[in-house]
Image (spheres, rainbow, N blue to C red):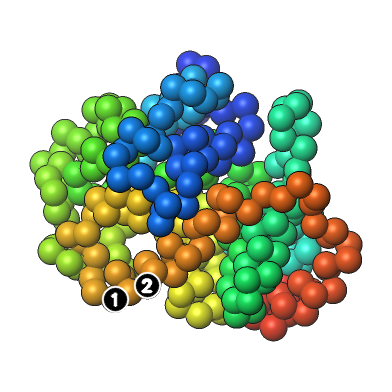
C-alpha cells in the first residue's frame, strides 16, 4: 500500500543540510545581534535553494498533524528499530552525506564536532559540550525510511492554531488540523501557560533524540535538544501563551545553544581522530554504551 504521506511532486530537498543552510539565510546573525525588523533577516528570495526548501515546507506543513505526531510516537518511541554502540551510530549517521552535492563536503560528524568544539572552547560544562556533539543524532530517522519533512525543519506545536511566524505559514491551509475546530484556535487542546511538557511538537529529530536521552542528561541539555529547531518561539516568541515560567527560564539555555549550532563553521575542520579519545570519555560519562533506536 502506498504511504498516505507521499506526494508526486518534486523532491523537497536535494540534501538534508539544505534546511540548515536556509536557516542561515533567514537568521544570518545570532539572536542578540538581530535587527528587529523581520525583513532584515527573513529574506528567502536570496537562497539558491528556495524552490526545494519551499517544497520541503509545503509537505511538512501539510502532513505534520496532531494525529501524525501521535502515530510517529507510537512507531518510534518504543526504540525497537535497532541497537547500536554509540560510535556505530555516529558511523551510521555519516551515511547521510550526499556525495552528489558539490557545495557540502562535511559529514555529520564534522558538523557535530564543529558545534561541540566551539562550545568547549568557550569553557562551558562538559554536558553542554556533549549536547553539541549529539544534538543532530536524531537524523538517523532518515535512515529508517522517514521522509526529510518528518526529520528536519522548523518545529512547532501541533494541537493548536499554527502561528503566522512559522516559516511559510501559507502552506498550513492544506493541513487538516487547520479545519478542525479542536485545533484551529489559539490554545487548541491546551491551556494558558500550560507548559511545554504538556504540548506535542511536530515530529522530527529533536523530539526523537530528546526521548532517547531524557534519562541521562541535565535538564538544560534536554531543552537544547528538544527545542533547538523551535524557531517560531526562540526567535519570534510566537508561543509565549503556552510557555510556563520554567520554560522561559530554560529557554535561556536554548538561546545559548543556537549560535553554536548555526554559526560555528570553521575554515579548518576539527581532527576527528585526534579528538575521539576525549569524546569517548565524555560519552561514557553520560550515556549508556549501547543506544536503542
Residue 25 versus residue 102 in the image, above or below = below
Residue 253 seen:
yes
At 49% from the left and 28% from the top, the residue drawn is: 53
Position of 158 with respect to 185 (left or right) is right
Position of 58 with respect to 49 (left or right) is left
Question: Badge 2: how crowded within 10 Å, few (<14), some, or many (20+)?
Answer: some
Which residue in the structure is indicated by mark 2? Answer: 250
Name of the residue lying farthest toward the bottom: 285
Name of the residue lying farthest toward the top: 9
Question: Badge 1: how crowded within 10 Å, few (<14), some, or many (20+)?
Answer: few
Residue 69 seen:
no
At 64% from the left and 59% from the top, the residue drawn is: 115
Q: Which mark is residue 30?
A: none
Whole-angstrom CA distance, mark 1 to mark 2, is 6 Å
**Which percent across, then down, holds residue 51?**
49, 19
Residue 111 versus residue 291 in the image, above or below = above
Secondary structure at badge 1 equals helix
At 66% from the left and 63% from the top, the residue drawn is: 118
Residue 34 versus residue 42 in the image, above or below = below
Residue 287 is drawn in which quadrant? bottom right
Q: Do residues under tags 1 and 2 come within 8 Å of each other at their CB atoms?
A: yes
**Which percent across, then down, holds residue 274?**
88, 66
Front-lying residue, 225 or 204: 225
Residue 216 is drawn in which quadrant? bottom right
Which residue in the structure is indicated by mark 1? Answer: 246
Secondary structure at badge 2 equals helix
Front-lying residue, 161 or 28: 28
**Which percent across, then down, holds residue 206?**
49, 56
How many numbered discs? 2
**Which percent across, then down, holds residue 8?**
48, 17
Front-lying residue, 28 or 290: 28
Amino acid at each position: 500500500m502506498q504511504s498516505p504521506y507521499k506526494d508526486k511532486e518534486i523532491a523537497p530537498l536535494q540534501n538534508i543540510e539544505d534546511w540548515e543552510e536556509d536557516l542561515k539565510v533567514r537568521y544570518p546573525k545570532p539572536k542578540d545581534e538581530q535587527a528587529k525588523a523581520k525583513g532584515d533577516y527573513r529574506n528567502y528570495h536570496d537562497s539558491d535553494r528556495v524552490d526545494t526548501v519551499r517544497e520541503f515546507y509545503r509537505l511538512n506543513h501539510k502532513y505534520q498533524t496532531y494525529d501524525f505526531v501521535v502515530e510517529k510516537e507510537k512507531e518510534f518511541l518504543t526504540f525497537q528499530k535497532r541497537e547500536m554502540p554509540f560510535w556505530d551510530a555516529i558511523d551510521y549517521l555519516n551515511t547521510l552525506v550526499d556525495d552528489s552535492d558539490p557545495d557540502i563536503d562535511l559529514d555529520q560528524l564534522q558538523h557535530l564536532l564543529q558545534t561541540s568544539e566551539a562550545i568547549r572552547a568557550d569553557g562551558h560544562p562538559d554536558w553542554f559540550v556533549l549536547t553539541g556533539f549529539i544534538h543532530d543524532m536524531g537524523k538517523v530517522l532518515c535512515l529508517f525510511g522517514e521522509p526529510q519533512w518528518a526529520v528536519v525543519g522548523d518545529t512547532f506545536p501541533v494541537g493548536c492554531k499554527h502561528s503566522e511566524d512559522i516559516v511559510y505559514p501559507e502552506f498550513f491551509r492544506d493541513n487538516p488540523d487547520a479545519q478542525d475546530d479542536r485545533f484551529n484556535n489559539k490554545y487548541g487542546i491546551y491551556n494558558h501557560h500550560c507548559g511545554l511538557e504538556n504540548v506535542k511538537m511536530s515530529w522530527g529529530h529533536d523530539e526523537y533524540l530528546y526521548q532517547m536521552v531524557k534519562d541521562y542528561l541535565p535538564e538544560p541539555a534536554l531543552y537544547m535538544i528538544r527545542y533547538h529547531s523551535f524557531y517560531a518561539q526562540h526567535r519570534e516568541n510566537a508561543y509565549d501563551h503556552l510557555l510556563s515560567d520554567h520554560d522561559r527560564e530554560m529557554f535561556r539555555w536554548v538561546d545559548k545553544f543556537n549560535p553554536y549550532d548555526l554559526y560555528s563553521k570553521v575554515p579548518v575542520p576539527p581532527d576527528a581522530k585526534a579528538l575521539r579519545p576525549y569524546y569517548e570519555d565524555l560519552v561514557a560519562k553520560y550515556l549508556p554504551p549501547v543506544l536503542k533506536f
